[in-house]
Amino acid sequence: MFLKIDKMLLSNDAKSELKSYSQNKSGIQAMQPGDLAFTAGCTANVCLITPTHVYCANSGDARGILCEKGKSLDLSYDHKPDLPAERSRVISAGHYVEDSRVDGVIAISRALGDWEYKSDKLPAEKMAVSGYPNVTKTEITANTEFVVCACDGIWDCMSS
C-alpha cells in the first residue's frame, strides 16, 4: 500500500490538487523541481492489530512501539541516511549522504513522495529515498498493554 500511495502522488489528479496549494502557477503538469507533487513528502507508520499479533509498517522516522509490563519494545526503527544499509542504498542510487542527510538536504532515507530523490528507472527498494517500508510482526501476549504510533515530533523529544 505504501508504494501505491507513493506512485499515486504523481497521478494527474494528485498533481492537480497539489498544484492548487503550490506556488508554481506555470500550469505545467510535468514532474519537475518546484512542483509540489515533485518535492512534497511524508513519513508513514501504520500498525495493524489482530487478536494475536501487531504488524507494523514503517517508512521514515515515524515510529511504532509496544508496551509490555511498563517496558517499551520498538516495532520499527527510524530510517536515517547514516545507517549503513540506508547509506549504501542512497549511494548506489547515485546520491550522497552529507551531514546525516540525503544530498545534504533531507534527514530521512525513506518516505512517501519526495520524488526529487527517486527515479522511475529503479525499483522502489533501491531508490535513494524509498517508500518501501520495513514490516515487523510482534506477538501479542498477556503482558501487552498498548501500542503507540508517533511522528518524529514526539521521538525527537522523547525516547521510546
Image (tube, rainbow, N blue to C red):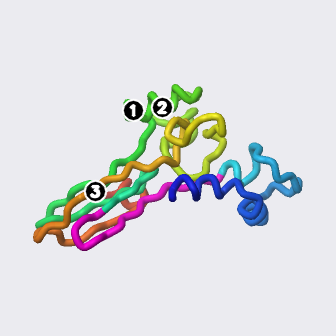
Q: Quadrant of residue 122?
A: top right
Residue 105 horizontal side relative to residue 25, left or right: left
Q: Residues within 10 Å of mark 3 (few under 14, many from 20)?
A: some
Q: Earlier in the sequence, mark 3 or mark 1?
A: 1
The residues bearing labels 1 and 2 have C-alpha atoms spaced at a distance of 6 Å
**Residue 114 among magenta residues:** no
Tell me the residue that label 2 is attached to.
89
Say how many tags the image has. 3
User: Residue at (72%, 57%) from the top-left corner?
Assistant: 11
Q: Nearer the viewer, residue 123 or 93?
A: 123
Residue 51 horizontal side relative to residue 96, left or right: left
Tell me the residue that label 3 is attached to.
137
Helix, strand or loop status at disc 1? helix
**Vertical order, 53 against 130 (above or below):** below
User: Residue at (19%, 66%) from the top-left corner?
Assistant: 140
Q: Are marks 3 and 1 in contact (CB under 8 Å)?
A: no
Q: Quadrant of residue 154?
A: bottom left
Q: Most prominent secondary structure in the magenta stretch? A: strand
Q: Residues within 10 Å of mark 1 (few under 14, many from 20)?
A: few
Tell me the residue that label 1 is attached to.
85
Give the amino acid type for the residue marked by disc 1 in the picture. Answer: Ala
